[in-house]
Image (cartoon, helix red, strand yellow):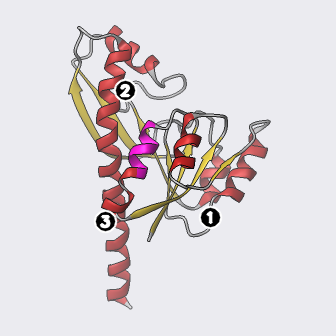
Amino acid sequence: MFNIVVLSSSGGGNFEIAVKNQNTIGYTISKLIVDRECGAIKKAEENNIEYIMIGRKNQDYMTQQLLESIPPNTDLTILLGWLSFLSAEFIEKCNINIINIHPSLLPKYGGKGMYGVHVHEAVMKNKETYTGCTVHYVTSQIDGGEIILQKKIRVDYSKTPWELGGEVFKLENKVLIEAIEIIMKDRYKENDDIRENE
């Protein structure tokens, strides 16, 4: 079984989509890690998924707690509305692929301060024709990792930034699952190649 750990600080909308697609796609969400009280906790409880809340008192403490909280059989870690900074030490020592979904067409509107409605406000202020979302690998550079998948929609200027965010969120739901499928297929192909070379 392909095991996934989710890190979240948010309401858990994308987390809920990931939970609902477990049986269809063939993965298991083995654990939810949160850094504050948030809606994702309730969704974990409703679906009998183990969760843990870690402290945020300093970066070293958070890094150590994260490393201790991720099960050794984890195949993928996904950030879904995770608002805390991940240290370079954690990313290196975790030794597991970590991906993030971002509500813009990276590299545009990424980096510090670019999250939630702030992204959509910036997109509309700059009169962009298109916006969308990106799933990418996580590195020590915020929103700077290799892009796995992107999808775009035309910006509707009759909407508010909040409403545009809702449209992008619907797109995120689809892109997230497609990205998980891509990663799973790549992993299984790697395993098949290894067996053939043994």
Any magenta on residue 17?
Answer: yes
x and y percentages locating residue 75 in the rendered image:
49, 64
User: Which residue type carries mark 3?
Assistant: Lys
Residue annotated with mark 3 = 185
> Badge 3, how many Cα within 10 Å: few under 14, some, many 20+?
few
Indicate which disc, 1 or 2, sits on the residue closer to the N terminus.
Answer: 1
Q: Would residue 154 be found to the left or right of residue 186 on screen? A: left
Quarter occupied by the C terminus: bottom left
Q: In what element is the residue under mark 2? A: loop
Q: How many marks?
A: 3
Q: CA distance from mark 3 to mark 1?
A: 22 Å
What residue lies at 26% left-to-right and 16% top-to-bottom? 128
Q: Label 1 is placed on what type of residue?
A: Pro
Q: Secondary structure at mark 1?
A: loop
Q: Nearer the viewer's eye, disc 1 or disc 2?
A: 1
User: x, y percentage for residue 76?
Assistant: 48, 59
Secondary structure that dominates the magenta span:
helix
For label 2, the residue is 108
Q: Is residue 129 above or below residue 75?
A: above
Quadrant in which the N terminus is drawn = bottom left
Closer to the chain start, of discs 3 and 2, is 2
Q: Which residue is mark 1?
A: 71
Which of disc 1 and disc 3 is earlier in sequence?
Answer: 1
Identified by mark 2, the residue type is Lys
Q: Mark 1 Cα within 10 Å, few/some/many (few <14, many 20+)?
A: few
- Mark 1 vs 2: CB contact within 8 A: no
Task: Give, as a single range, the part of the protein colored magenta.
Answer: 13-19
Residue 110 sits in which quadrant? top left
Q: Quadrant of residue 186?
A: bottom left
The location of residue 98, given as percent across then percent down, is 50, 52
